[in-house]
Amino acid sequence: MAAHATTAERAYRIGSIPGDGIGPEVQAEGLKVLAASAALDGFRYTLKSYPFGGEHYLRTGELVTPAVVDEWRGLDAVLLGAIGHPDVEPGLVERNVILSLRFGMGMYVNLRPVKLLAEHLCPLKGKSPHDIDFVVIRENTEDVYSQIGGHLNIGTPDEVAIVTGVYTRKGTERIIRYAFELARARAGRRAANGHRPRLTMVDKANAIRPQSLWTRVFEAVAAEYPDVETDHAYVDACCMWMIKTPEQFDVIVTTNLFGDIVTDLAAMLQGGMGIAASGNINPGHTSMFEPIHGSAPKYAGQNMANPLGAIAAVGMMLDYLGEPTSAARIERAMEQCLVDGRIPSIDARSGLSTTQIGDLITAEIHALAAHAAAPARA
Ligand code: IPM
Ligand code: MG
């Protein structure tokens, strides 16, 4: 994983955007886990909260401005809860907050780990945690997300809507290179298990010919990584393989829109949107971490939503900041509580409240740390 320059004093400046709907509730549980990790592992952090989102927009008319984005550049990381409000024009605040961060701050990597922590969470028959353990690297600053396009004769029978997908050689090459490096790093960490790095590039260059830029750049960069096995799949086939033989995937690299779509599918393999997290990374610079679920307005304010996605986002952030012990412990705590049934399911009907789940994970983190610190018996 791309290392962030670890500050010598292990003090991190973190911005938080709780956002809308269930965002503030799930983020509060993520922050509980952050506080426990800091106390156990001896790092410090400052937290500054920003009110942006649909709720705030309706109340004040205020949106994220370039000046705010400039301020965020001085942070080490940003944690996002969830953005989106049913009374605001669809996508307006999502684009303003999430895309201002991704595009405005050059977070060109969207890193989405797909790992099944407990077998019973997987909707596929006969698949175990051993079979579902891969990472999707989604390009995060180009494609049809570039907002180039518009309408002509809007609302009339002669309406025309045009959207342009942008793929630059520079943007394509840097994301593909990041994916090769990640495949290598993952293999290095699991060399003892005989794990071999494998990278699958996903495009739709048969129908969308300009995407052959991706195919060509992938081939050229692959020549520099002879130790990484490569594969290629069109996005429709990739969806089919993800259900049929998810065990074939190690690292996937793909375009922005296809990455958006395949990661919702992939999230279901690990149990659902309630557990998936992602990192929006500008290697070596301010990066943003978020659960991949939305604001789920119908569960807002009821202490019902599952906070595991927000907790996993904190784990990813700590890994990026250079606190791998904390990150690994958070994942292990989630795994333990899911495997032994203390957290029986990850939907909003688990029988546990948002705060109870945060408390269970925090208690397990303390138990794991105590166990690791205990002297081994002869
Ligand atoms: C995601 C979301 C966003 C996206 C939306 C909210 C703009 O679906 O992070 O996957 O399309 O990237
Ligand atoms: Mg999405």
Image (cartoon, grey):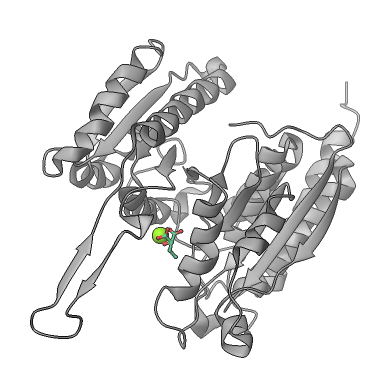
Relative to 103, does residue 368 appear above or below in the rendering? Answer: above
Q: Is residue 202 above or below residue 360?
A: above
Quadrant of ligand 2 in image: bottom left
Quadrant in which the C terminus appears? top right
Residue 34, position as x, y percentages in the image: 77, 54
Number of disc labels: 0
Percent x, y of residue 368: 78, 43
In the figure, residue 215 lies in which quadrant?
top left
Q: Is residue 318 above or below residue 292?
A: above
Could you tell me which quadrant the N terminus lies in? Answer: top right
Relative placement, left or right, of 330 versus 202 is right
Above or below for 136 versus 1: below
Residue 209 horizontal/vertical position (percent): 14, 39
State the residue at coordinates (31%, 18%): 220
Is 242 on the left or on the right of 6, as rendered?
A: left
Image side of residue 268 versus residue 234, left or right? right
Identify the residue at image location x=44%, y=24%. Answer: 180
Residue 294 in sight from this viewpoint = no
Q: Residue furthest left?
A: 157
Which residue sits at x=46%, y=61%? 273
Pick the residue in front: 324 or 377: 324
Observer-nearest residue: 211 or 133?
211
Q: Residue at x 60, y 62 (%)?
A: 66
Q: Nearer the viewer, residue 87 or 172?
A: 172
Q: Nearer the viewer, residue 56 or 31?
A: 56
Residue 208 visible in the displayed image: yes
